[in-house]
Amino acid sequence: MEYTTLGGTGLRVSRIGLGTWQFSEDWGVTSYERAKAIVEAAVESGINLFDTAFRYGQGLSERLLGRALRELGVGYDDIVVVTKIPGELLSRDDVFRAVDVSLRRLGFGAIHVLLAHWPPLWRHIPVCEYARAFERLVVMGKVHYIGLSDHPLELVEAFRSCLSRIDVDVLQYKLNLAEREAERDVLPYAEDLGASLMAWSPLAKGAIVRSVEPERLRELRDYRRLDPLYHPVNYSQLMKLYEEVKRVADKYGKTPAQVALNWLLMLSDVVIPIPGATRPEQVRENAGAAGWRMSWSDWRALDEASRRLRLTYVVQEE
C-alpha cells in the first residue's frame, strides 16, 4: 500500500481508502459478520482510511464500522475515520447532537475528521453557523480536523471565511474516470489549498468496470438499477470506455478496477479514492490499485477515451 499525508493534518493515510456506504440497506451489507470481514480485509491490505456518514444505513454504517475496528483490535491512533453530518442537521445545536450520536455509534472519544455531507438545501442555515460549530468542536477536542463534501466552491470559500483558528483539510466529491466535473475547479482548488480530495464513487458505482450488468441489477432490485449511468443511453458509451480500461488491465496483469483507480492516483497526489465494497475480495482487489503505475501513454489513452463520453442525467421516459 502507498501512503500520503491527509491535507495539512499530518495524519498518514493509505492512498486507497474504504467507503462504507455499502453497510446499509441500499447496498445490502447489513450483517455484522459480513461487514467485519470487509473491514478486516481492508486492515490486512494496509488500508487505514475509512469513510462513513451519519445517514449511511440510518446509523448502521457507523455502528458496524466502529464495532469491527474494536473487535479486530485496531487502535484509534492507527486509523483515520471520516464521518459526515447531512445538510439538514447543520444548525449549531444539531451539529453538536449529531456528533454525540456518531461518537456513541463509533465508540470513539473524538472524531478524526468531520465533514458537512452536503449544504443545508432544505433549511435556511447560514454557512457561518455550521462553520463555527465545527470549529468549536475542534477547539473542544471532540473533532480533530474538518472538511466539506459536495459543496460548491463558493460555499467552501464562505465556510473558510467564517473560521478563525483552523482551516479545511479535506474536500470530498464524486470523481471517477467517467464523471470528471470535479477536475475543472475542485481539484486545482484542493491542490492550491493543500487539502486532500477524497474521491467518492471512484468506480462510478461499478459502471466503468462492468461489475454487474443492468439487467442483473433489475433482477436483484439493486440500489443502482435507477442510476443514470446504467441507463442504456449512458451504459453503451461506458462499455466503450470499459474496453479501453480492459485493454490496459490485460497489458499490466491487473483488473479493470485496479486500472481505473490507478488512473485517479496518477491524476493528482492530493486525490484519495474511497471505493466501497460488498465483499472482502473487492477490498483486496481495490488495494491492488496502489504500488504501481501505468505508462503516460496508457494514462493518456484512458483520458482520451473518457473525454469522448457524452453522458446525460436526463434519462426518464417520456
Image (cartoon, helix red, strand yellow):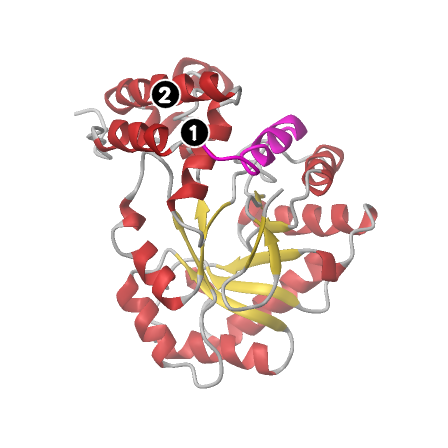
Q: Amino acid at mark 2?
A: Tyr
252 relative to 48, above or below: above
Query: Going 29% across and 18% down the picture, which residue do you hit?
Result: 240
**Which residue lies under the disc numbered 2?**
242
Q: Please state the extent of the stretch shown in magenta in the rendering.
A: 278-294
Q: Local crowd at mark 1 within 10 Å, few (<14), some, or many (≥20)? A: some
Q: Secondary structure at mark 1?
A: helix
Question: In this rendering, would 244 be left or right of 3?
Answer: left
Q: Can residue 221 be seen at all in this image of the molecule?
A: no
Image marks 2 and 1: residues in contact by CB distance under 8 Å:
no
Query: Going 23% across and 21% down the picture, which residue do you hit?
Result: 233
Inspect the magenta stretch and tell me whether residue 264 lies in it.
no
Residue 316, position as x, y percentages in the image:
23, 29
Inspect the magenta stretch and tell me whether residue 284 lies in it.
yes
53 relative to 123, above or below: above
Query: Going 81% across and 45% down the picture, which residue do you hit?
Result: 72
Residue 305, position as x, y percentages in the image:
26, 27
The mark that comes first in sequence, 2 or 1, is 1
**Which residue lies under the disc numbered 1?**
224
Occupied quadrant, residue 264: top left
> On the rendered image, what quadrant is the N terminus found in?
top right
**Label 2, label 1: how many angstroms apart (C-alpha)?**
18 Å
